[in-house]
Amino acid sequence: MDEIWTRPYSPGPGRWLIIAWEAAALGFLAWVAVREFELAGHSVRFVAGTLAAIWVIGAHRILQMGAYVGATGLRIHGLLRSRTMPWRDIAHVRLHKATHRVGPWQIESGLTVLIDRHDGSTVNTELWAQGIDFHSRPRLFRAVYQELRSRHQAAQNPS
């Protein structure tokens, strides 16, 4: 029987802005390609169709991005790939204060959720407190983090 995966939060409205932005960017790319290479007829339809297909696939992946929980594990859907980890392989679910170094400066970019595995590796999730899903919903970010920790603890200590 197939596992049922649920995302413990609703996606933020910012995803639709990103999808619209990508549509505009790909439309501009098509316009530039047609003008620059003086395309006509079937070539224009081919470029438009190819970029439309790329946009549809990308939009679908953007809408699916996130962390999904199931009875047996955690699934992380990213833009380019997805990975599934059984709860037994996860050592810790933790918050991480992300920073980026730009020259001599360190710029804080907010909290993210990281998964520490028993093999010593760390898995980055798509959960970012300042991201498109949680930027205006900080309580939801904390609730999702707590949900992941609760699910992990319940799987480690079955009754």
Image (cartoon, rainbow, N blue to C red):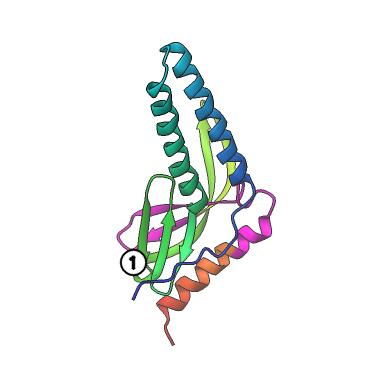
Image quadrant assignment for residue 53: top left
Left or right: 52 as drawn, with respect to 142: left
Magenta residues, as a range? 114-143
Left or right: 32 as drawn, with respect to 81: right
Q: Residue at x 38, y 22 (%)?
A: 43
Residue 142 seen in the figure: yes
Q: Which residue is tagged 1?
A: 89
Magenta stretch contains residue 133: yes
Query: Looking at the figure, which quarter contains the N terminus?
Result: bottom left
Q: Residue 84 or 120: which is nearer the viewer?
A: 84
Residue 34 position, x and y percent, is 45, 17
Estimate how packed mark 1 is, as few (under 14), some (14 to 19) or many (20 or more) residues with alpha carbons within 10 Å. Answer: some
Query: Looking at the figure, which quarter contains the C terminus?
Result: bottom left
Q: Amino acid at mark 1?
A: Asp
Residue 131 seen in the figure: no
Residue 77 position, x and y percent, is 43, 54
Residue 95 position, x and y percent, is 53, 56
Magenta stretch contains residue 96: no
Local SS, label 1: helix
